[in-house]
Amino acid sequence: MAKVLVNEDECNGCGICVTECPSEVFEIKGDIAVPINEDECTACMICTTECPSDAIEIEED
Ligand code: SF4
Ligand code: SF4
């Protein structure tokens, strides 16, 4: 299982991670991406690649 971290200072709420994550891990809450479904993360790294603000960090166990 991976840990999904969003840097709230860097996230601009664009929602790209919501659209691009195949496991539907993210939801936008209050203009910031929140990992609501962290258990489903497969560490595919699509979100870290696609995030324009470099705001997401995936920590693999
Ligand atoms: S893609 Fe990056 S900047 Fe956009 S909502 Fe997700 S974490 Fe925030
Ligand atoms: S690494 Fe892949 S599965 Fe995990 S949150 Fe990012 S896009 Fe979703």
Image (cartoon, rainbow, N blue to C red):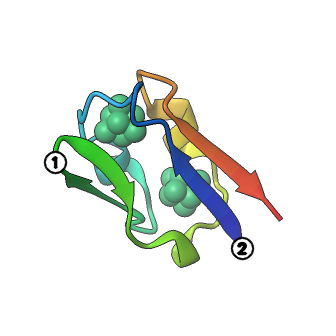
The disc placed on residue 51 is none
Residue pushed farthest right? 61
Q: Distance of mark 2 from mark 1, alpha carbons?
A: 26 Å
The disc placed on residue 30 is 1
Residue at image coords 83%, 65%: 61
Image-based side of 60 in relation to 13, left or right: right
Is disc 2's CB within 8 Å of ligand 2? no
Secondary structure of the residue carrying numbered label 1: loop
Amino acid at circle 2: Met
Q: Are marks 2 and 1 in contact (CB under 8 Å)?
A: no
Q: Position of residue 24 (x, y in %)?
A: 37, 66
Q: Quadrant of residue 32?
A: top left
Secondary structure of the residue carrying numbered label 2: loop
Q: Position of residue 34 (x, y in %)?
A: 35, 55
**Up-down relation of residue 18 to residue 12 (above or below):** below
Amino acid at circle 1: Gly
**Up-down relation of residue 31 to residue 50 (above or below):** below
The disc placed on residue 1 is 2
Nearer to us in this view, 28 or 40: 28
Residue pushed farthest bottom? 39
